[in-house]
Amino acid sequence: MRLSILENILRNHSLICIILSTLLLIIFFKIKNQKLLNDVLLFSVIINLITFNIILIGTDQFDIKNHLPLHLCYLTEVAILATYFFNSKLLISWIVLNGLGGGITGFTNSNLDLNVPIIEFIHLYLSHFNLLLFSIITFKKKFIITKINFIKSIIINASIFFLIIILNNKIGSNYWFTLDKPEGNNLTNILPDWPIYLFVMIIIGIISYFITYNLFRTK
C-alpha cells in the first residue's frame, strides 16, 4: 500500500515539480557556497544517470528506441557530467542555453505516459532539476554568454536535430519528437498534428534561447 501511494505521488508531475521548484528558489536566494552546489549537482547527475540505466537494464525494460540519452535535455545533462569530469568550459554556453528553457519546459510539461516504470518519472524530474541547478550555479558565477557562443549553440542544435531525424527514420524511434507528439500532459496536446506542432516547438526553443542569452549576456 505504501509503495502504491509513493508511486502515485511520484507520478503527480505538478506536485513534484512544485516541490523541486521551491527547492531551486531556496538554493538561488539562500545558498552561496559554490563548492557545495557543484558537489550536489555532480552527485545528482551521476546518481540519476547510473540508477536510471541500471534499473532499466536490470529489469529488462531498456529500449534503444526510447531510453538512449538523445532527447536534448538528456544530452545536455550528459554534457554537464563531461564538463565536470574534464573541467572544461567548452560547452557551458550550450548547456545553459539548453538547460534553462529545457528545465522549465520539463517542469511544466510531461512527455511520459502514466504506465511507464516509476524510474522514468524520477529520471525526468532529476534531469530537469539538474539542468536548472546548473543554470543557477552558472548565473551565480556571473558567467557571460557571448554572441559567438550563442550562434555556435544554435548551429550545434541544428546539426544534432538533423542527425536525430536520420536516426529516427532508421530505427523507428521518436527522439526530439520529430515523428509524433510526445506522450503525457504537455503543450502539444492543444497543437495541430505533425508537422505544425514540431515547428511550434522549434519556435519556442528559439525564443527560449533568446531569453536565456539576454539574461546571461550582460552580467
Image (tube, rainbow, N blue to C red):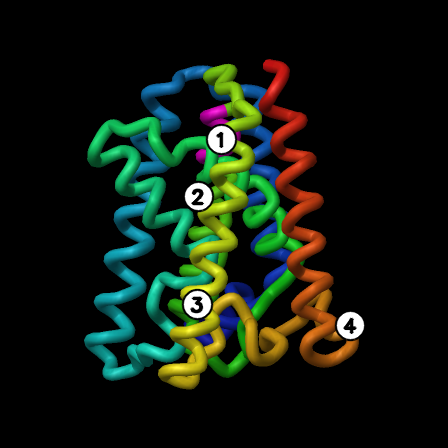
Q: Earlier in the sequence, mark 2 or mark 4?
A: 2
* Alpha carbon separation for disc pair 3 and 1: 22 Å
- Answer above or below: position of 28 versus 43: above
Q: Residues within 10 Å of mark 4 (few under 14, many from 20)?
A: some
Q: Earlier in the sequence, mark 4 or mark 3?
A: 3
Q: Which mark is residue 212?
A: none
At x 66% / y 68%, what residue is drawn? 198
Q: Residues within 10 Å of mark 1 (few under 14, many from 20)?
A: some
What is the three-letter code of the residue carrying label 4?
A: Leu
What is the three-letter code of the residue carrying label 1?
A: Asn
**What residue did someone put label 2 on?**
130
Of badges 1 and 2, nearer the viewer stands 1
Q: Secondary structure at mark 1?
A: helix
Q: Earlier in the sequence, mark 3 or mark 1?
A: 1
User: Does the magenta segment cover residue 135?
Assistant: yes
Q: Which mark is residue 149?
A: 1
Count of marks overlaid on the render: 4
Image-quadrant location for residue 106: bottom right
At x 41% / y 65%, what residue is drawn? 163
* Alpha carbon separation for disc pair 1 and 2: 22 Å
- Is residue 122 shown to the viewer in this render? no
What is the three-letter code of the residue carrying label 2?
A: Asn
**What residue did someone put label 4 on?**
191
Of badges 4 and 3, nearer the viewer stands 3
* Residue interval drawn in magenta: 134-138
* Alpha carbon separation for disc pair 2 and 4: 28 Å
